Amino acid sequence: MILGRADGTMVQAPEPAVHRSWPEDGFPHGVYGPIPDDLTAAANEQLDNFAEILRSRGIRVDRPESIDFSQRVSTPDWTQDSMFGCMPPRDVLITVGNEILEATMCYRSRWFEYLCYRPLIDSYYRADPDMRWEAAPKPRLTDASYKKDFWPEYESLDFAQQIARVRANDLVLTEAEPLFDAADIVRFGKDLFVQLSMVTNRSGVDWLRRHFPSHRVHAVTFANAHPVHIDATWVPLRPGLVLHCGEREAEPELVEYFKMNDWEIVPAAPPTMTWDGLPRLCFCSPWLSMNILSLGPDTVCVEASEVAQMELLDKLGFEVIPVPFWDVATFGGGLHCSTVDVHREGTLQDYFPRRHGRF
């Protein structure tokens, strides 16, 4: 597995795709800079501890190379006053079969983030003659890729209006070019479910559908007013069992597709973490509690303070490995977000032989 690093992570400079504002911590909207050293040290301690837990299970753990994320970056089309970081590699990379694919990334601050992983990917490519190394088309990310003045207008809507926009994928991204984050893709064998979100558009799903012709690629939405990444909403646990965030209603067709193929959909336990208890500068929700890492069909890693989630999974027959990890949330995610599985044992399976509606 690849496990991210917290070093050098920034509260990124303003850009069209993302809105950050933490006035109580010295970062009101428009102010950017490095995440404080004490938060970085706490996150790195938990990341290093997680690495040792994985190694104790016989898992090889590789780490990306941090670069100067405070530097200004540019292309011929734009200039961005800072980058972001390299804690959540799941956002950038996805492994499908013998291929590692680099996602497009719609944040200008994350456009160059793939550079942190290139030395690792190059080493895998040189070591394995059967590996495919692919990169989705790097987007231009001109102003045409974003809806002008989206955030003030969207935040003025009520919840029902926002969900209607989510279902229609009428969000911050336009369809000017294919855009997707790898963490909006969840793999169920031959089926890939891709969440339409603030960072993934329909053109991105279409590109993935053409790129993976031997897979069924499905666009999905949930009743989440601020969708960014699917791995705290719809999480495969083992064949026939999926964990669902009950607050984020799934589309009826998606639910029926799973049920008619004999999948059990289990609501996740309510998170122990509260909105008020989230770490400083954290842009994740308490539902990061279900951002778990599966090590196999019977073993899962869960944030150590999420007792209800661990009890639920224990009752479902899993060996649960508690991992302290909430200090990492400030840097972009949980146990699943922080990792990319490079190599797993097993073969491609078709878990959905029966079709339903558009699925």
Image: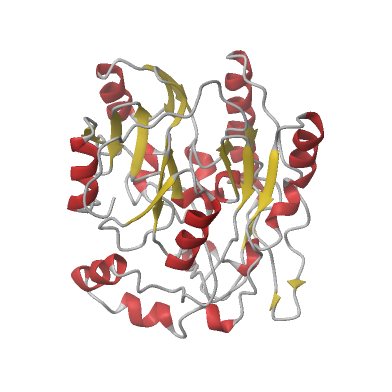
* Residue at (39, 60) in percent of width and height: 196
The quarter of the rendered structure image containing the N terminus is top right
Q: Measured along the vertical axis of the image, is residue 33 above or below residue 275?
A: below
Give the colour scheme of this rendering: secondary structure
Image location of residue 327, percent across then percent down? 52, 40
Image location of residue 77, percent across then percent down? 70, 81
Q: Nearer the viewer, residue 347 or 339?
A: 347
Quarter of the image for residue 136 reads bottom right
Q: Nearer the viewer, residue 114 or 246?
A: 114
Whether residue 54 is visible here, answered yes or no, is: yes
234 sits to left or right of 85? left
Q: Measured along the vertical axis of the image, is residue 24 above or below residue 240?
A: below
Q: Measured along the vertical axis of the image, is residue 48 above or below residue 193?
A: above
Whether residue 33 is visible here, answered yes or no, is: no
* Residue at (45, 66) in percent of width and height: 201
43 sits to left or right of 126? left
Q: Count the marks.
A: 0
Image location of residue 8, percent across then percent down? 71, 52
Image location of residue 160, percent across then percent down? 19, 69
Quarter of the image for residue 131 reads top right
* Residue at (24, 31) in percent of width and height: 263
* Residue at (45, 52) in percent of width and height: 184
Q: Nearer the viewer, residue 322 or 197?
A: 197
